[in-house]
Amino acid sequence: MNINATLFAQAIVFAILVWFTMKFVWPPIAKALDERALKISEGLAASEKAKSELAVANKRVEEELGKSRNEAAVRLADAERRAQTVIEEAKARASDEAAKIVAAAHMEAEQQVVKAREALREQVAALAVKGAEQILKREVNAGVHAELLGRLKTEL
């Protein structure tokens, strides 16, 4: 065999191999590479979009947390004010009740003083009658002298 013929045959086989590869093998590989590149670019775009959405969501969460903290502080302040109001009302009711109890005690004491005075008047009247009876050495009839005893009670 001649080296030129071998070289020529190898060149023809190589040309057929290149043509076959370019016609049947290379397009699916190029298509797969293009699809992969497209998926990667879509993934990167989705990643960037997700990052921006995450930043927006984080900002919204921070705003909501701030609002919640402020609302909680306002509610706590309202609750404290209501508690103070309830305490003040309870104190006012308690002091009103204490004043009523003291007034009732004063009235009861006044009534007891009046009753004691009446009892004392009765006793003084009886003592006066006994004293007058002993002085006169005769019995004084209380029924007969009721008017006199009544005047004596009012004078005492």
Image: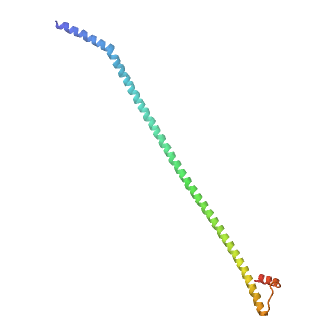
Q: Quadrant of the N terminus?
A: top left
* Image vertical order of residue 82 relative to residue 109, above or below: above
- Residue at 52% x, 49% y is 72
Q: How many numbered marks are there?
A: 0
Q: Position of residue 129 (x, y in %)?
A: 77, 87
Q: Quadrant of the C terminus?
A: bottom right
* Image vertical order of residue 95 relative to residue 34, above or below: below
Q: Nearer the viewer, residue 7 or 146?
A: 146
Residue 108 found in image quarter: bottom right
- Residue at 42% x, 30% y is 46
Q: Position of residue 119 (x, y in %)?
A: 72, 80
Q: Position of residue 78 (x, y in %)?
A: 56, 53
- Residue at 49% x, 45% y is 65
* Image vertical order of residue 122 relative to residue 83, above or below: below
> Which of the colour schemes (rainbow, by chain, secondary structure, one colour) is used?
rainbow
Q: Nearer the viewer, residue 105 or 74?
A: 105
Q: Is residue 58 left or right of residue 136?
A: left
* Image vertical order of residue 11 relative to residue 72, above or below: above
Q: Nearer the viewer, residue 122 or 39?
A: 122
- Residue at 80% x, 82% y is 150
